[in-house]
Image: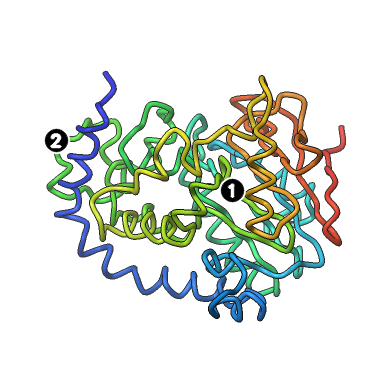
Amino acid sequence: MSLSARTRRTLARVALLGLASLGSLLVAGCDAERARLASSATANDAKSAAPGASPRAQFSAHVFPEQKRVVAFGDVHGDLEATKRALKVGGAIDDGGHWNGGDLFVVQVGDQLDRGDDDRAILDYFEQLREEAAKAGGTFLSLNGNHELMNVSFDFRYTTEGANRAFEDVPVPAGLASHPAATRGRAAAFAPGGLYAQKLAKQPLYAVVGGSVFAHGGILKKHLDYGLDKMDAEVRDWLLGKRPEGPPIVLAEDGVVWTRAFSAQTGDSDCASLSEVLKMMQAQRLVMGHTPQRAGVSLACDGKAVRIDTGLARYYQGPIEVLEIVNNQAKVLREKP
């Protein structure tokens, strides 16, 4: 039987009693990672904090200058093998799985978790790639999607037995001792302040790289009005165990990790709203995951909406495709047969 949302929130609050101290120990590490990424932002973004400046002043935390080459790929859902295949198509890793992309900038748009057995392995691997890329002068940036935040909310409907077993060695605080045995270790790992919630705290909700905006579900005007950096900071505080619940504007059906306003396979995308958002963000395109595109990467709204969730994980059996952006021009790279 699935736990109600209220029950999951209550359990998360209880878990804080045992995990808050752990969260405080790791906050500094997350702050350092955020500072390193933010240091890549352009000088213009820094100047935009002045009165009357660009709207980007309201979302400067994860804004990066145009890169020589950007590669982005979609939801991987617990499939490490497919993840590495996508990274190889993009020229990011070698045959041994280590970074060989040099100054390449890679963005993974969220949903690392659920539906496959490799959840823990993927999060550990992404941490490895972040470190290897930084040493080589590149960037590996993974975003949070709805499935990451579902796990922090103890919504384990889409987990597998194999993925749950991988977390069995995570120490369980007293507050979670009564949690179902099958997911007790996983709950300890992802509860606010938990070891893997701390890892997720290093992942933002959005990124802007040159003329491209990246998010898991999408960005609506209401998100800009609320403040992307504000919601990003609130999610981070929740993951670190510094607040009991995630911000409703993020977790709502039209939240930044949930909306399908620009990615639904049926019906028309809200192109007028997207144009308004991109104008406010001084960008040319929104790149998103969340909604599997059965035929591969797809475009809408005259190329302003780029949907890169190809269902590449084993669960969906979709094609291995990644998006490449060079000189602000985007094209699809496909795995050779």
Hey, which quadrant is residue 253 in on the image? Answer: top left
1 or 2: tag closer to the N-terminus: 2
Type of the residue with mark 1: Ala
Q: Is residue 13 left or right of residue 216?
A: left
x, y percentage for residue 13? 18, 47
x, y percentage for residue 7? 20, 32
Q: Which residue is mark 1?
A: 215
Q: Which residue is mark 2?
A: 178
Which residue is drawn at the image coordinates 72% and 44% (left, top)? 86
Which residue is drawn at the image coordinates 50% and 75% (left, top)? 35
Callout 1 secondary element: strand
Hey, which quadrant is residue 17 in on the image? Answer: bottom left
x, y percentage for residue 65? 71, 70
x, y percentage for residue 96? 70, 55
Q: Nearest the camera: 24 or 167?
A: 24
Compared with 257, 237 (above or below) is: below
Q: Nearer the viewer, mark 1 or mark 2?
A: 1
Callout 2 secondary element: loop
Type of the residue with mark 2: Ser
Compared with 67, 70 (above or below) is: above
Which residue is drawn at the image coordinates 75% and 70% (left, top)? 103
Q: Nearest the camera: 115 or 220?
A: 220
- The label on residue 62 is none
Q: Is residue 139 left or right of residue 162?
A: right
Quadrant of the image containing the N terminus = top left
Which residue is drawn at the image coordinates 12% and 48% (left, top)? 174
Hey, which quadrant is residue 273 in on the image? Answer: top right
